[in-house]
Amino acid sequence: NYEQIPGISYAQPGYSLRHVEELLNRMGNPQFAARTVHIAGTKGKGSVAAMTARVLTASGHRTGLYTSPHFHSLRERISIDDSLISEAEFAATMAEIRPFIESVRQDTAFRQLTYFEVLTALAFAYFKKEQADFQVLEVGLGGRLDATNVAKPAVCIITSISLDHTQILGNSLGQIAREKAGIVKPGCWVVISPQPEEAASAIKEICREKEAKVVQVGEDIKWHKTGGDMFHQSLVIEGRKNNYHVRIPLLGDFQLENAAAAVAALEIVGSAGVAISAADIAQGLAGVRWPGRFQVVQQHPTVLIDGAHNVASMKRLVSNIKEYFSDKRILLVFGTSSDKDIPGIVSELVSLSPHVIVVQARHSRAASLAVLAAEFSQRGIEVETGESISQALSRALSKAGRTDLLCVTGSLFVVAEALDYFSAS
């Protein structure tokens, strides 16, 4: 996995977008070919991207979707109208842009291009070649210096912000929010999800500086849940233009907020003369898929897989587990990255009184089993270590009764291996 090889760092002094901009300029600036919805944030940006793209597709608009990271195949990051880029198209598009990559690489005026910059350029080239009407772009990291921040968005969305990647983006919510709000362009529309006060202040300050037009989720657009089961939620979204009765195949209260953010952005796009009906919104949201986020993959016992990997997202996961599964004994398969706030994350999980098996994903930043086990045991939680994620899952399933809950969480890398395990079984 070339993405795991250390290279040029976002946090490196002097890091800028001029290198990827030069590459794209030599390619004919494909990033400007489609209308753009650009999404930054700590939590929920992938879900909002998937929802937005699905509705645009349901509305009859050819829509490219660019997200990260992937679970199994790099091709998962690039799709048009719900179809992943094929291996043949990926190879062909890379062959087409390779001469431009090489020309920049050989030009001493520019630094080495990063893995993410090259992949982003490939996505833009593919969307242009396929004549996409829209491209929905999920920021990879931060926003201001992210390789996706070279397009001209019709609307930006900033989802919920919390402390994450602090060694790169900053040690406070305000610093992180300013990095995320770096995607805001002068005069553009910005949808802002509910935020902690420090983050909200920083985002709104940048919006004022850029004279951006703001739609605040929770104030200008509201929602309330009307029903649900183990696999769906129903809600009413009170938009600025209309009320929408929708059903989404995603669980967790955070997905209600994400759906409202997507609808806020879609209303803005619709106001610019793009045909998007209430029926399109309902149909699109009903068909959205976003695996690994509060996803039930099995029953008897119930198996829940969630990619929560910081304190805020773990707090939200624990709250949702208590809402949906309050009557169940909990087994937990947990692994996370060494650069996360492990004590803070574990402190959230102990309120579930789980039986824990700690695991280590096949990733260079995975926290050691000893460190993870110590965090749980010193808080009085029974903990075992797993030789591998598949072995830990087999052991957990053998311990679980039919009415128990097995939760797998802590890292998207752990989630990817768990999804592999359950798809194979």
Image (cartoon, rainbow, N blue to C red):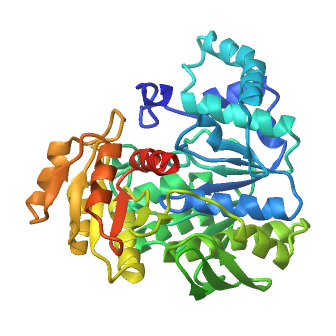
Q: Where is residue 102 in the image (x, y as percent from the top left)?
A: 67, 13
Which image quarter: residue 249?
A: bottom right
Residue 137, placed above or below residue 89: below
Counting labels gives 0
**Residue 80 is at least partly visible in this image:** yes
Residue 7 placement: quadrant: top left
Classify residue 157 as left or right of residue 294.
right
Left or right: 396, with 237 as reference point: left
Q: Residue at x 21, y 66 (%)?
A: 347
At which x and y percent is residue 230? 52, 76
Give how far across and how far down residue 136 sits, in percent. 71, 52
Question: Residue 63 at x, y = what percent?
Answer: 80, 52
Query: Which residue is painted at 38% across and 79% down in the image?
Result: 325
Residue under the image location 40 percent in, 26 percent down: 6
- Position of 390 with respect to 38 (left or right) is left
Q: In this rendered view, identify the residue nearer to me: 45 or 232.
A: 232
Q: Which of the two residues, 201 or 146, is positioned nearer the viewer here?
A: 146
Q: In which quarter of the image is residue 257?
A: bottom right
Examine the rendered structure and indicate whether residue 418 appears above or below residue 108.
below
On screen, residue 38 versus residue 31, left or right, reads: left
Q: In this view, does 27 lie above or below 103?
A: below
Residue 335 can be seen, yes or no: no
Q: In the image, is residue 172 above or below residue 322?
A: above
